[in-house]
Amino acid sequence: MMSNVQMIEKTRLTALREMQLFIIVWIGQLIALIGSSTTAFALDIWVYNRTGSVTQFALISLFNTLPLILISPIAGPLVDRWDRRKTMIFADVLACLGTIAIGVLFVMGRLEVWHIYLANTFTAVFMAFHMPAYTASTVLLVPKQHLNRANGLMSLMYGISIIIAPTLGGILLSIVHFQGIILLHVTSVSIAVVSLMLVRFPQVNTSVVTTAKSSFLSEATYGFTYLTARPGLLGLILFSASSLYLVGGINVITVPLVLNFVSVSILGTILSLFGIAILAGGLLVSIWGGLERNIYAIYGCMLLNGVFIIAAGLQPSLVIFTASIFLFSLTQPIVSSSTQAVMQKKVEPSVQGRVFAIKGAIEAAALPLGYITIGPLAEKVFEPLMATDGYLAGSIGQIIGVGSGRGMGLLLIIMGVLTILETSIAYLYPRLRFVEDELPNVSNAVAIATDTPSSKNDAVSLVS
């Protein structure tokens, strides 16, 4: 008889063996993401030092995001038509050309801010192909019982890059300078490409919903048509996107709010803590595997998010704010991985490129929407209301305080209350609550889910 510890260890080893193809790809993509995030950090510093303009600095995010929103409907059908492994390889290589161009211009002494905007747009176009191809490939590489773990690892990947990139970028800027960081980026992408070349993806099974003979225009809109025919999935994406909207709003509030209490150096430490929370959440999901019913994990985390955001705004306390947003950040990988798992189980592999492209476009829009709506509300409306002589100073101000930062605190409380209300309404929507019951699971191409000699041979045969 095996002990409980031995059984747990065997389960973990089995999961690792069944996910080995995914892990090979994941390691390569992690290295590439660290390289690209380090370069992005260095470019941010260069633009801000060159211009001294917060607006110019913010435009970098716009040029990184806008192509994803615009190109995704076109990229989705092509991702479904093309070999997804080759799509990722070509997207990685072509996206890297923009970085190489920046490096060449920098060495020649001709780099301008508009060059960076153009290069970011160029890179984002190819990332619009890479992201749905990578997401849709997960279901081909991972047995469905491990999808939550795989999605947790993807969240972990982003958490690692958030923590490592600023520190690594700061160190490398003083040692190897900007051109050295560009070289690191190119090297990291080369490693990711090699990892993809080592793995052969299983072929996508032909589905009855494939629209190969239809016009490209209908294919470009097919992802949205597919989702509107399955309102539970569309509701799930919009619900998940609202979480990213909150992330954008909190990000734009955090810096000025924290600077009311501490210096810039302490701010950097606090932001790193939030990155650690995302990393820990991804690690938790990758080990735990998530709930059997993913929708309950999403509902539960969104309710907790509302509570955490309310707590962050109640008092002018740095400790309470930091602890609350740390816990909020911890739940984000659970929401994203659970959402992704439902989509991967319910959307046919042959159309996942199109559907995930629409999902990516909606989510890509939610984050900057949080920036551009919450930021002006905080600065132009709520801060004046909660000033010492503001309209609400004698009422709500007697409860949560008045002065600098209290308007942002009130806005956080309102955001938290609306999140709880939104979650309650979403729970009452039966198509979303029962989405895992009403829609059948689709079959995937992974044939390595059993612990048998033949399955091990099958797994090995997929690695060239």
Image (tube, rainbow, N blue to C red):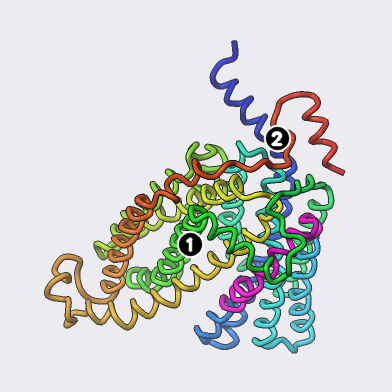
- Given the image, on which type of amino acid does mark 2 rest? Glu
Identify which residue is drawn at 75% across, 24% down: 452
> Could you tell me which quadrant the N terminus lies in?
top right
Magenta part of the protein: which range?
A: 61-87
| Left or right position of 282 against 384 | right
* Alpha carbon separation for disc pair 2 and 1: 31 Å
Q: Is mark 1 on a helix, strand or loop?
A: helix
Tell me if mark 2 has few (under 14), some (14-19) or many (20+) residues whose alpha carbon lies within 10 angstroms of its own: many
The answer to which of 346 and 313 lies nearer the viewer is 346
Q: In which quarter of the image is residue 124?
A: bottom right
| Left or right position of 296 against 44 | left
- Name above or below for residue 335 compared with residue 292: below
Whether residue 323 is visible: no
Percent x, y of residue 123 = 70, 73
- Label 2 with label 1: CB-CB less than 8 Å: no
Q: Quadrant of residue 308?
A: bottom left
Magenta residue check for 95: no
Percent x, y of residue 454 = 81, 26
Identify which residue is drawn at 56% across, 58% down: 227
Identify which residue is drawn at 69% across, 42% down: 444
Identify which residue is drawn at 51% across, 58% down: 234
- Given the image, on which type of amino acid does mark 1 rest? Ala
Residue under circle 2?
18
Residue under circle 1?
241
